[in-house]
Image (cartoon, rainbow, N blue to C red):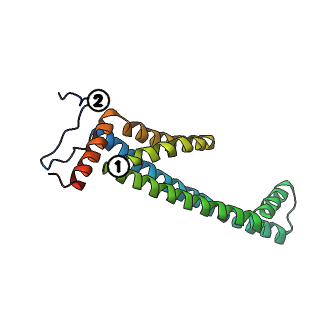
Amino acid sequence: MSTPLPGAAHPPPSYDDRRTPVVPTSVTVAVWSFRIAALYAVGSAAAFLLWVRGTLGDADKAASAADFINDRGLEGRSAEVVRRVADAASDERWRTVLTVVGVVFLVLALLAGVVYLLLARALRRGRGWARVVATVLAVVSLLWLVLGPQAWLWVAIGVVGVVASWRPSASAYLDACRADRLRVRQGRP
């Protein structure tokens, strides 16, 4: 059992044969949480785009059904409902808005995925700024909670990564990496 360094709030990390700090479990958990959050963001965007595509396809089917009803001269409550749905679905503004929202959501999700992957890589390499940026993004992502259960899972995955990155073992690892980089910059063995 190692003792904390004087003035340090956490025990020093262990080192491997090459004198580099060994990545603690808390950093590994944080890195994988960020990777999973990146995949989840991109997967959610893909699912949303599939939904948009299906919705637009359903609108085309409703328009075809309305044409069929009109061609045959059918009347009644069901025919009227189909006509109204087809009129709403064929509105070009609705299609444009849905397409734009889908594309914007895809771009934002891809951007979030890239940011999560960059944070995971930086944290794994011992960069302390990565957990600060992840913490800020986690606080901002709390706004997504209003979107419902699907967003709750994404936010929870990110929060798990942030909490893991602030564990004492992660702090010791980041401190050791910073000291190692300083040692190399100063030319010391």
Q: Looking at numbered disc 2 in the image, what kind of residue is underneath it?
A: Gly
On screen, 1 above or below 40?
A: above
Q: Nearer the viewer, residue 19 or 143?
A: 19
On screen, 98 above or below 173?
A: below
- Horizontal arrangement in the rendering, residue 186 relative to residue 39 (left or right): left
Residue visible at 37% across and 43% down in the picture: 30
Q: CA distance from mark 2 to mark 1?
A: 21 Å
Residue designated by label 1: 127
- Horizontal arrangement in the rendering, residue 105 relative to residue 132 (left or right): right
Please tell me whether mark 2 or mark 1 is closer to you in this view.
2
Q: Quadrant of the N terminus?
A: top left
- Horizontal and vertical percent for residue 189? 14, 51
Whether residue 90 appears in this view of the structure is no
- Horizontal arrangement in the rendering, residue 14 relative to residue 86 (left or right): left
On residue 7, which mark appears?
A: 2
- Horizontal and vertical percent for residue 41? 50, 53
- Horizontal arrangement in the rendering, residue 121 relative to residue 156 (left or right): left
Secondary structure at numbered mark 2 = loop
On screen, 118 above or below 10?
A: below
Sequence-first disc among 2 and 1: 2
Q: Looking at numbered disc 1 in the image, what kind of residue is underneath it?
A: Arg
- Horizontal and vertical percent for residue 124? 32, 49
On residue 160, which mark appears?
A: none
Whether residue 28 appears in this view of the structure is yes
Residue visible at 45% across and 58% down in the picture: 114
Q: Are marks 2 and 1 in contact (CB under 8 Å)?
A: no
